Image: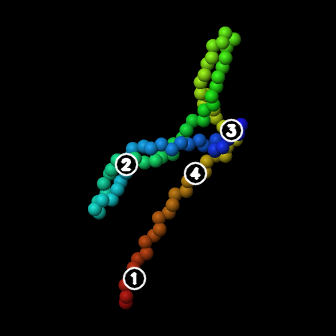
Amino acid sequence: MAAITNVCKPVKTETVKKKVSVKRHGKTVKVTKKVSETVAAPLLMPTEMVAQNGAVLKQSTKIAVTGCKAAKAAKAHKKAKKRKKRGHR
């Protein structure tokens, strides 16, 4: 099977309406915006079966890929400590 894209993790981009926090005039306001988001997509294989009497059955079969490496867990970023200002003595 030849593949052009990554078959271990197929994704598709969708435009979704989401509530997002936005700063306006010094205040944080929740606003509904259209956001592009990548979501998991099923890996489908077209299947066609022909019976002896000539009846045709067409469907898309979900398939799974084996032999892919497990995903690594994302590391959380540490917040930088704020430095204290020293006054003149």
- In space, the residues marked 2 and 1 are separated at their CA atoms by 44 Å
Confirm or deny contact between disc 3 and disc 1 (CB under 8 A).
no
Q: Where on the picture, by quarter, is residue 55?
A: top right
Q: Position of residue 23 (x, y in %)?
A: 33, 59
Q: Is residue 54 above or below residue 17?
A: above
- Residue sitting nearer the eye, 54 or 78: 54
Give the Cα distance between marks 4 and 3.
20 Å
Which part of the image, by quadrant, shows the N terminus?
A: top right
Which numbered mark, 2 or 4, is in the foreground of this view?
A: 2
Amino acid type at circle 2 is Lys
- Residue farthest toward the right in the current orientation of the protein: 1
Q: Mark 1 points at which residue?
A: 86
> Three-letter amino acid code at disc 3?
Thr
Instruction: Give the alpha-carbon distance from disc 2 to disc 3, as whole Å.
Output: 38 Å
At horizontal 37% and vertical 88% (from top left) the residue drawn is: 88
Residue 76 in the image: x percent, y percent?
A: 52, 57
- For disc 3, the marked residue is 66
The residue sitting at the top extreme is: 53
Mark with earlier residue (4, 3): 3
Q: Mark 4 points at which residue?
A: 73
**What is the distance, in whole Å, between disc 1 and disc 4 at their CAs?**
40 Å
Where does residue 78 sit, x and y in percent of width and height?
Answer: 50, 63
What amino acid is found at the position of numbered circle 1 in the picture? Arg
Q: Is residue 19 above or below residue 61?
A: below
